[in-house]
Amino acid sequence: SSSFLTVDKLNISWPAMAQAQFERVTNKIVTVSGDIHIEQTTRLKHIIMNQLEKVTGSIQIRSNSGVTNITMPKLANIEGNFDVQSNLNIVGINTNSLLAVLGVVNVQSEPKLRTFQTPLLDRVGNSLFIRNAIVLVPDFPALSSVGHNFVIQNLATPTIIDLPQLQQVLNNLVISNNNQVLKISAPSLNRVDGEVTFSAMRELTYIDIPKLASVKNVQLGGLTKLADICSFGITSFNPSGKVEITDCPRLVGGRSHVLQRAGLPSVGCNGIAVNITSRGDYETFRMSKATTRPRSLTVSWADINDSQLKNILQDLELIILSLEIVKCRKITEIHLPQLEGVGGHISISHCES
C-alpha cells in the first residue's frame, strides 16, 4: 500500500527476518492501536520505524541478538510500557520526540547501550527502571514526574546523574550499585512519596537535591567518598520518617546511624555560615569549634593576627559555598592544611600585609 497505516498490533518473532523484510513491513506504520512485540530475531540489525507516532499499547523489544539500534524519531506517546531488555548488541535508542510514557519504562540488561535519547520526555506514568546498562550515561533533561518507582542500578561508566527538571517521584527513588557515579543532581526535586536510597557508590562525592521537602525515609550506605549532605535539603518528614546512614566513613565516622527528624542537621552537615568580625566572634568560634565543614566562612576582623587566623583555618576540611578573608590588615600568611574542597569560591581582598 502507498498510504500510511494504522494497525492493531505488530508482532515479530521470526529469527531469520532480514532487514529489508522488516522495513517493508514497518516503514509506513504511523499508529499502533495495540502492542508492538519484537523478539528473538537474529539477522535484524536496526529497528527503524521512521513514521511511527503513537502506540496505544506497549512496546516490548527483547532478546534480538543482532540489533544495534532502535530508531523511532517521531514517536511522541506510548500509552502502555516501553520495555527494552536483553538485546546484547544495542548501542543506541533514538526516541527524540517522545513526550510521555503512561506505563513503565524498563531498560535492562543492555551491556553495550551507550545512549538512550529522550530529550523531550516529560512524564513517566508508572515506574522508570534503568538496570544493568553498564556503559549507559542516563540523560533525561526534561523529565519532571515519575508516577511510581525511579530506579537506576548497575552502571559502570564514570558519570554524573543529572535530572534538572525532575520535581516528583510518587514512590521510591533508588540509585545504587553504580560505582562510577560521581554526582547526583536533581535541583528541582521537592517530593518523594516513598524512600530515597543512595547506596554502593564508592566514587560519589556530591548530592545536589536542595529543594527536597517531602520524603518518608532516607537511606545512605556504602558512599565511601561522600563527606557532606548539606546540599541534600530535606526539610520535612512524615511522622515515621528517618534517615539511616551506614558505611559512609567520611560522613559519620563509619558508624551506622539512625536519626529521627530532629537529628538530621547534625550529621555530616555542619552547614552553618561563620562570620568573624570581632574578638568576641573569634573567642566564640575558638571555644566551640563549631564546624570543620561550614556552609561559608567570612573573616573580616581588621585586627586579627596570623596566629588567630591559623586557629580558625587549621581544621577546615570542606567549605560548601565560599571562603572570604577581607580587610584583615595585619595578616601576612594564610594556611589551610586540611582543606580538601570549596564548593564555590575563595576570595582574599584588602589584606594590606
Image (cartoon, grey):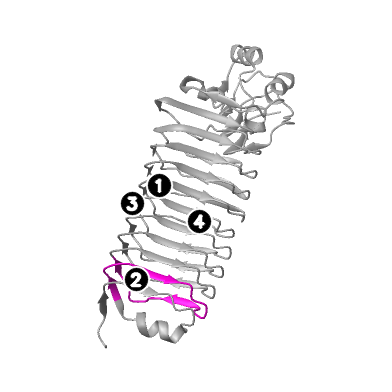
Q: Position of residue 243 (x, y in %)?
A: 51, 28
The three-letter amino acid code for the residue at tag 4 is Pro
Residue 166 circle label = 1
Distance from Cα at disc 1 to Cα at disc 4 = 13 Å
Which residue is the site of mark 2?
74
Helix, strand, or loop for circle 3?
loop
Residue 296 visible from this viewpoint? yes
Which is more N-terminal, label 4 or label 1?
A: 4
What label does residue 125 carry, if any?
3
Cα distance in 3D space between marks 2 and 3: 20 Å
- Determine the CA span between mark 3 and mark 1: 13 Å
Q: CA distance from mark 2 to mark 1?
A: 24 Å
- Left of 149 or right of it: where is 299? right
The residue at which mark 4 appears reads as 138
Q: Secondary structure at mark 1?
A: loop
Name the residue at 58% across, 25% down: 257
Horizontally, residue 108 falls left or right of residue 252, namely left
Frontmost residue, 191 versus 105: 105
Q: Could you tell me the amino acid type at mark 2?
A: Lys
Label 4: element kind: loop
Residue 41 lies in the magenta-colored region: yes
Query: Where does residue 266 sit, x and y in percent of width and height?
Result: 55, 22
